[in-house]
Image: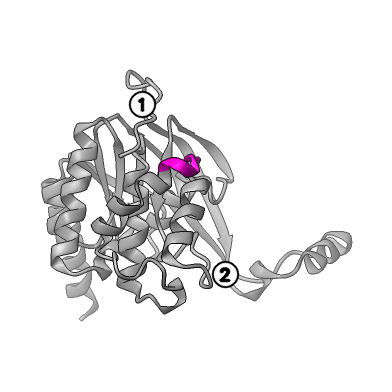
Amino acid sequence: MIDQRDGTASQPAIEVGNCSKRFVRGAAAYGSLRDTLSRLVRRERAAGEPIQALDDVSLVVEPGEIVGVIGDNGAGKSTLLKVVARITPPDTGRVTVRGRLSSLIEIGAGFHPELTGRESVLLHGSILGLRRRDVRGGMGAIAAFAGLEGAMDTPVKFFSTGMYARLGFAVAVHADPRVLLVDEVLSVGDLAFREACYERIRQLQALGTAILFVSHDLPAIEGLCDRALLLASGRVTDEGPPNAVVAAYRAATAARMAKSR
């Protein structure tokens, strides 16, 4: 394990203040730079339906705290992680992250399909700011944790989604992050691997890592997290003890389903 913590344990590891993010649904949202500039010159508005992915969201995560995020598909959970990870900037509000951040948000993110597992680990470690010699020294432990000792010299384009997830998680946690972001990707692993991941998350928590954990696995949220928040239409609608927030979510879902019958 590579230990490069920065001694900021007295401050919150994650601070999200009044963040909002809006996207535009439809092809116009993903047009070329030429199309965008053309619309600006002609003062045309982009076509498509605006989606409020985050709406005035605030959140503080302390060192050594695991905060679960739950909600329906499209509630804004992944957008929240991407804003914290600086993958996408908020339209309004502020985000502060203290210390090294590792994220496991999308399966295969940071892996080039033509690179081998070993080369992918070296590349991903460099992206996380790790020294190449440290990554090489930890290669055996990373491969063993992922259960891929015999596949590290295979191009990752031949990996299954489960293999991608296992390798990505192994690199992320062996970077010894101060902040760890985990999306739904652990759901693709088998039971033994998920349990190993949860155990590693608990170990990182004991070391003071702040963890933001998005999952539809409600028992995992209840068993792993110190606190949970519920997102709906980009807004935080409930926050508190995981059992209480999960119960509120189950009740709201049941009521919505009963109403739609």
Q: Please say if 160 is above or below 4.
A: below
Residue 240 seen in render = no
Question: Closer to the camera, 57 or 199?
Answer: 199
Question: Residue under circle 1?
Answer: 12
Q: Quadrant of residue 4?
A: top left
Which residue is found at the position 27% from the left and 70% from the top? 188
Which residue is found at the position 24% from the left and 62% from the top? 216
Question: Residue under circle 2?
Answer: 25
Which residue is found at the position 35% from the left and 37% from the top? 2
Which range of residues does the magenta coloring cover? 129-134
Which residue is found at the position 20% from the left and 61% from the top? 252
Which element is circle 1 on?
loop
Which of marks 1 and 2 precedes in the sequence? 1
Q: Quadrant of the N terminus?
A: top left
Q: Identify which amino acid the numbered label 2 is placed on.
A: Arg
Question: Closer to the camera, 15 or 100?
Answer: 100
Q: Are marks 2 and 1 in contact (CB under 8 Å)?
A: no
Q: Position of residue 126 (x, y in %)?
A: 51, 47
Q: Please say if 13 is above or below 29.
A: above
Left or right of 250: which side holds 130?
right
Q: Is residue 82 magenta?
A: no
Packing grade of label 1 (10 A; few <14, some 14-19, many >=20) is some
Q: Position of residue 245 (x, y in %)?
A: 18, 48
Q: Please say if 86 is above or below 220.
A: above
Q: Position of residue 162 (x, y in %)?
A: 30, 71
Question: Alpha-carbon distance for marks 2 and 1?
Answer: 34 Å
